[in-house]
Image: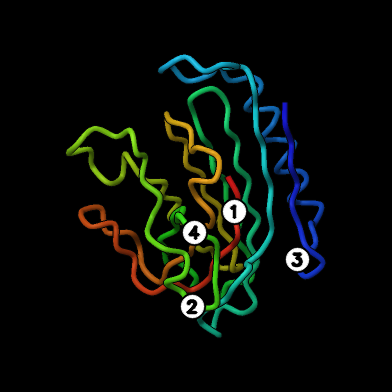
Amino acid sequence: MIIRILHTEEQPMRPSARTAVVLAAAGAVLAPPAAGPALADPGSIDITAVTGPTRVYDDAYAGTETEIYTVRQGNSTIVGLQVSGFPREAAGRTFGVHVHVNACGPRPEDAGPHYANPDAAPGTPLREKEIWLDVRIGRDGTGSSRADVPWRVAPGAAGSLVIHAERTDPATGDAGARLTCTFLPF
């Protein structure tokens, strides 16, 4: 089992994120690997936890915090998200959240497009070949979401998690402006 807890001095790891990692690891160990093509070591587990955001693109969301964990086991990937510090006006709204291909940069577009499973068959709906974690914000400015996909994100193939201004449109995958971005290494 590989467990990586990543943080920087600017974004120190908080105890709640450590707890999420432990719970994620326990859940991953108990769950059998997803069916699919054989891997060299289908029992291996790769867990990563990060806090953020790394970049904020809309000043109204400068007080937000993200805690993200990824679990890759066998042929599956789980991404979990906890957010806090959303402004009062966000209560009751749902925000689109997606895994993107590049790391965060100074400009919102630096994160690049959504990561899409390269092995998805032609015509696969976006929702089934991308990782979406749309999150509904409570009255207290917090929210959480999780996405489980039956395929494994290859090392280095994705680099960030972006929170968007709107709910994800299931037909187009669009979710409006990019509000924050958190570095998320795979």
Left or right of 73 on screen, residue 148: left
Of the numbered discs 2 and 1, the one sitting upstream in the chain is 2
Earlier along the polypeptide chain: callout 1 or callout 4? 4
What's under tag 2, amino acid-wise? Arg
Alpha-carbon span between mark 1 and mark 4: 9 Å
Residue at mark 4: 102
Residue 184, numbered circle: 1
Q: Vertical placement of 73 versus 144: above or below?
A: above
Q: Which residue in the structure is indicated by mark 3?
A: 11
Discs 4/3, front: 4
Q: Sequence-wise, which precedes: disc 3 or disc 1?
A: 3
User: Which of the pair 120/66 is nearer the observer?
Assistant: 120
* Numbered tag placed on residue 107 in the rendering: 2
Q: Secondary structure at mark 3?
A: loop
- Residue, far left: 123
Q: CA distance from mark 4 to mark 3?
A: 19 Å
Q: Which circle, 1 or 4, is nearer the viewer?
A: 4
Q: Residue at x 76, y 57 (%)?
A: 7
Measure the alpha-carbon separation of dots 2 and 1: 17 Å
